[in-house]
Image: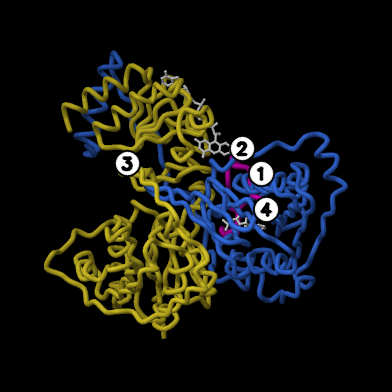
Amino acid sequence: MNIIVCLKQVPDTEAQIKIAGDAKSIVTDDIKWVMNPYDEFGVEEALKTKEKFGGEVTVIGLGPKRVTETIRTALAMGADKGILICDDAADGSDSIAVAKALAAAIKGMEYDLIFTGQRGVDDDLGVVGASVAEFLDIPQLSLIEDVEFAEDGKSVKVKRPVEGEVLTIESSLPVLITTQKGLNEPRYASLPGIMKAKKKPLDQKTLSDLGLDASDFGEGARKLKIVELLSPPARSAGKIIEGESPQEKAAELARLLHEEAKLL
Amino acid sequence: MAQGVWTIAEQRNGEFRKITYEMISEGKRLADALGQELTVLLLGSNIKDKAADLGQYGADKVLVADDARLEPYTTDAYVSVIAELTKANEPAILLIGGSVQGKDLAGRLAARLDVGMAQDCTELLIDGGNLVAIRPIYAGKLYAKVTYENSFPQMATARPNVMAMNEPDSSKSAEVADASFTLDDGMLKTKVVNVDKDTSGKVDLTEADKIVSGGRGMKGADEFKILEDLADVIGASVGASRSAVDAGWREHTDQVGQTGKVVSPSLYIACGISGAIQHLAGMSTSKVIVAINKDEDAPIFQKADYGVVADLFDVVPALTEELKKIV
Ligand SMILES: Cc1cc2nc3c(=O)[nH]c(=O)nc-3n(C[C@H](O)[C@H](O)[C@H](O)COP(=O)(O)OP(=O)(O)OC[C@H]3O[C@@H](n4cnc5c(N)ncnc54)[C@H](O)[C@@H]3O)c2cc1C
Ligand SMILES: Nc1ncnc2c1ncn2[C@@H]1O[C@H](COP(=O)(O)O)[C@@H](O)[C@H]1O
């Protein structure tokens, strides 16, 4: 089975995010960049599927040169080859444009299955997966916690939790699956894996290599415009409940929730 | 010219979900600000008799797409029908509830219509006749204010539990019309083969009005019983930090935070949770936060409206007893 995993590089979840001087972007100086945590589940599931059915795992990322590191991480985990779409003209593109470029790169390839994360933990959009599926005209299965292939590897059955229900959905292949926690435990790259990754193929492509028009990309082509970034409404420390004993504190808290916050 | 506000009703087996009323209420406010009408799209099977009542929450019109293939929801069928209706009618704004289903639908629909889409908004307003959306990014570490360019309809999903819901006015009823659409079986590539219902009766965390959450301080799976007891008394759902989930004490679907569920209850009680940045990110839009932690320096206290510095194994059972007297 040939599997593609889309990788987004995002700031480490530990990072404090600060607004830059233009009020529209963030300060990137001190940021440690990592693979979007949801994409780790995608890489793991792809590797597990390959171990069972054979085939090849290709990882693909769009972004600046530093995305190479994220691709190498996936290669070190065990993916076979990587593609980096790297083009200054793509800087500042919105999700639909990113998806168009990814779809263009994938279109020429042979694939049965594509994984993306359910959302990037940076802009929290969760649009790229569905859009890649749309532009490739294949079905999507979002927020999947369990994937099971038919013995012949021609169809797939997945579990998708929605509020208060778990749906089992069947689909033919090729299909795009978006991942979430619970799907698997992503492996770490081993030392030999890291060594091997250095020799694995990593192709770099520009927008024009993919037959795309640079004017459809970048800040200027955005359909969703960022007006400004804002700090969240300040939440300051409130009352510390006084009391001689835990029982007294509990009674006082209950009283405040009832009389002051009027929640109960 | 694009005209009117549209929203999509979310229903399961003919029952509307709460998010539907939230979106109608919010959609009506936007429509009023524009001086235009609010139309609700209702998709499902044998669903038409439920349509007029949506007027009670503010729908002016309900457009009904009735077809056996529209129950249960599938991305393929819904996107196909809604894209066709949107192209034919050209609404100015398309608002969708940010539930699991709504976000799935909105992502694909935005690509099909080739428009910008703001996911999971917490505030929507009209400025100069256009939609302005405010949405948390980096799981709430920042907010982005966004607008649309050459993009109609202006699409957004709104986070559950955030938009104020109108009081239903039983004297009102919406004008109901049948939608005309085509649905080609060849486009339907996925099929729901089983639905496993959660019978616990608990509201999903993303929709819960009250949440009691436990972290590593809970010490073990069995100890969560004291949180379940508290939750039962106040009608809350139980969440967890990643540490509690990774320890195997709770299901992964209970995880609150940047890589779990983002929640917006009116009351969030964090027990034995330190308040790591990834956890805070997932619950910072809660209206009232209570922290119970024995370490007075725990970062969670910086965000808590009410803090109790004590051993949770003493406080939680006592709190449950106290609240039994009140509720
Ligand atoms: C990529 C990534 C993503 C992550 N995503 C998430 C996420 O989505 N959600 C999330 O929650 N975390 C997430 N984390 C983990 C996060 O960094 C923290 O490790 C985690 O939130 C800590 O959980 P905790 O507060 O339960 O445990 P701890 O930090 O260990 O805190 C336990 C607290 O319990 C208190 N305590 C102990 N015993 C008692 C007692 N008897 N009475 C009262 N208080 C007591 C202690 O004082 C302490 O403050 C993520 C981490 C990474 C790297
Ligand atoms: N620039 C990118 N390069 C490769 N994959 C991406 C990129 N942006 C988003 N994705 C994929 O789409 C998922 C959802 O991202 P988003 O829609 O940006 O929230 C990510 O988890 C990735 O799998």
Which residue is depicted at the point 52% across and 27% down?
Answer: B247
Nearer the viewer's eye, disc 2 or disc 3? 3
Residues beneath discs 3 and 1 located on the same chain: no
Mark 1 or mark 2, earlier in chain: 1
B146 or B82, which is in the foreground? B82
Residue where numbered disc 2 is placed: A185
The answer to whether the beta carbon of the residue marked 4 is less than 8 Å from any atom of ligand 2 is: yes
Inter-mark Cα distance, 4 to 3 = 37 Å
Nearer the viewer's eye, disc 3 or disc 1? 3
Q: Do the residues labelled 3 and 1 touch (CB within 8 Å)?
A: no
Inter-mark Cα distance, 3 to 1 = 32 Å
Q: Does the magenta stretch include residue A18?
A: yes
Residue located farthest toward the top when viewing the structure as drawn: A244
Mark 2 or mark 4, earlier in chain: 4
Which residue range is magenta in the image? Answer: A9-26
Residue where numbered disc 1 is placed: A44
